[in-house]
Image (spheres, rainbow, N blue to C red):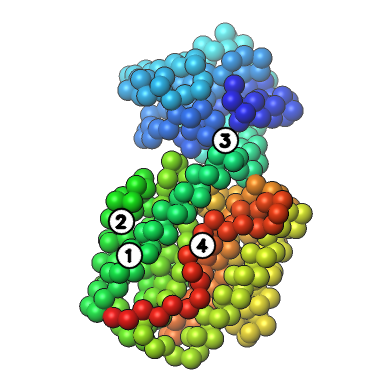
Amino acid sequence: MNEALLKLEQGLTEGGLDALLVTDPKHVYYLTGFASNPHERFLGLLLIRGEEPVLIVPALDAEAAHAASSVKTILTHSDTDNPYELLKSRFGGAAPGSFGIEKEHFSVSRYELLADAIPAGAFSDIGHLLRAMRAMKTPEEIRIMKHAAELVEEVLRRGLSHVKAGVSENELVAELEYLMKKAGASGPSFDTMVLSGPNTALPHGVPGERKIQPGDLLMFDLGVYAAGYASDITRTFAVGEIDSKLIDIYNTVLAANEAGIAASVAGATFGSVDKAARDVIEAAGYGEYFMHRVGHGLGMDTHEYPSLHGLNTDIIANGNVFTVEPGIYVPNLGGVRIEDDVLVTAEGPQTLTSFPKELTVLSL
């Protein structure tokens, strides 16, 4: 077994489970190396205490699974088979006393099919085991995430050359997503966001047909997937000369971003990162305009554990990767967000993103 599977097997034993089933395709990939989108078909990794793990895949994925999976026992099912009968057969007619599943991923209908095939004494959630494992990035994961950050920064750098008179937000989005593929990324890790002028005051605004104008703030929030791992960066630019109030907002957000990064140290709480950034913004008089958490975990998902909100008392550990992205959003004026991907190390916080953060003025 690989290291991840060994840790999961240890969690199975320590949790007093007789068996567990992993069904989230990203977790199957994380544990086995086999990446797949099964759509509505069943995909699962089964661990029974004291036995070798079993990977169950749709028949059409059999060849790919054998080529990529570190789990060598692979069972397949066709579109007319009942995959839950395959699961049932692994127990030899004996129902497990305690069975672990990913409750956040299991639909009610799939749970009913599973419970009918394997009437376990109890079904327990194993989501916390997988979240804890994924939160501690390995050197190989960090290498891939650095590459994903390099790719998205190359895309942003090239994308800025398309900021010209008459170009719209949507046109810039299209250029950026074209550049992602051209740079070698699998694709965007979330819906690419380009907002301009008053639209930048919308933290989750939707790009539209508004054309970039002199005096605008211009916000880019984008990320890519590379080898199954995400990057996520936000930078805000000035288009020509901007209002002095917007310059003050920008400098405040930049100071908050740097304060949040500096607070990202092992042994502190995740909530303290939010507080460090929020204190800067509140001291400058913009507290009411910073209405979201300061960041989120990053890895195989763009948003994963942990959530960096002010009430999170969980402890930061070396190997955690998360975003630090404070923002100020003033209606009818504009908004600024500056976001970096941060790795926690024994030597202190390290930013995986390195795109310049000083206020940059673009000319049309």
User: Does the CB distance between marks 2 and 1 fall below 8 Å?
Assistant: yes
- Point out the image quarter for the C terminus: bottom left
Label of residue 179 in the image:
2
Residue beneath disc 4: 354
Closer to the chain start, of discs 4 and 1, is: 1
Q: Residues within 10 Å of mark 3 (few under 14, many from 20)?
A: many
Residue kind at label 2, given as amino acid type: Leu
User: Does the CB distance between marks 4 and 2 fall below 8 Å?
Assistant: no
Residue shown at the point (30%, 56%) measured from the top left: 179
Residue shown at the point (49%, 15%) measured from the top left: 73
* Image quarter of residue 252: bottom right
Q: Nearer the viewer, residue 15 or 260?
A: 260
Q: Position of residue 259 (x, y in %)?
A: 66, 70
Decide if residue 116 is in sight here: no
Closer to the chain start, of discs 2 and 1, is: 1
Q: Position of residue 44 (x, y in %)?
A: 49, 26
Give the total of numbered labels.
4
Q: Nearer the viewer, residue 51 or 134?
A: 134
Position of 282 with respect to 68 (left or right) is: right
Q: Which structural element holds mark 1?
A: helix
Camera-nearest label, 3 or 2:
2
Residue beneath disc 1: 159
Camera-nearest label, 4 or 1:
4
Closer to the chain start, of discs 3 and 4, is: 3
Closer to the chain start, of discs 3 and 2, is: 3
Residue kind at label 4, given as amino acid type: Ser
Q: Which structural element holds mark 4?
A: loop
Q: Is residue 267 above or below residue 142?
A: below
Closer to the chain start, of discs 3 and 1, is: 3
Q: Which structural element holds mark 3?
A: loop
